[in-house]
Amino acid sequence: MNQPSNAFLQMEFPAEVWLAAEEIPLGRLLDMQCGDVLTLSKEPEAEVDLVVNGVTVASGELVVVDGFFGLRIATTATQKLAGLDNNGGGEENP
């Protein structure tokens, strides 16, 4: 199989880490003020998604590195499609 060219591999794409998504009534959004808290329906330990150009390519956990947020990759889209777990093996049966 042909390898992509170095120029192709140097291309940059917008990458986003999606913590959670919520549907909020417009009236609530308009009433929000500084200091208000928007509660998300995702637990703090839940995985977050790495989205590149609108496509989820990986998921993992948020970490702090030198005072900045980071993402520790747990699963890539390829692993998800293949049904593999974090260790490259099949999913465990409960």
Image (spheres, rainbow, N blue to C red):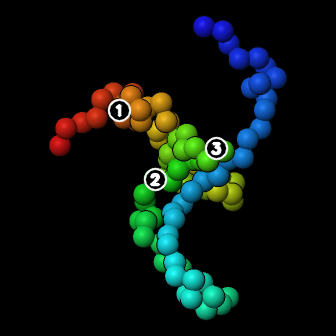
Name the residue that disc number 1 marks.
83
Q: Residue furthest top?
A: 1
Q: Decide if residue 52 is on the left or right side of residue 80.
A: right
Query: Residue pushed farthest right?
Result: 7
In the figure, 14 relative to 79: above or below?
A: below
The reply to whether the C-beta atoms of the residues labelled 2 and 1 are less than 8 Å apart is no
Q: Gap between marks 2 and 3, in whole Å?
A: 16 Å
Q: Closer to us: mark 2 or mark 3?
A: 3
- Pick the quarter of the image with the N terminus: top right
Q: In the orientation shown, which residue stands out farthest toward the front?
A: 26
User: Residue shown at 77%/38% (left/top)?
Assistant: 12
Specify whether residue 37 is in view.
no
In the rendered structure, which amino acid carries the disc numbered 2? Glu
Give me the disc on residue 47.
Answer: 2
First in residue order: circle 2 vs circle 1:
2
Element marked by disc 2: loop
The residue wearing badge 3 is 52
Q: Answer whether labels 2 and 3 touch (C-beta < 8 Å).
A: no
Per the model, the C-alpha gap separating discs 1 and 3 is 21 Å
* Left or right for 78, reference 34: left
Image quadrant in which you'd find residue 3: top right
Q: Between disc 1 and disc 3, whose residue precedes?
A: 3
Residue 80 drawn above or below residue 33: above
The answer to whether residue 44 shows anywhere in this view is yes
The picture places residue 93, in percent across and down from the top left corner, at: 19, 38
Q: How many numbered marks have been drawn onto this rendered protein structure? A: 3
Residue kind at label 1, given as amino acid type? Gly
Q: Whole-percent x and y of residue 31?
A: 61, 92
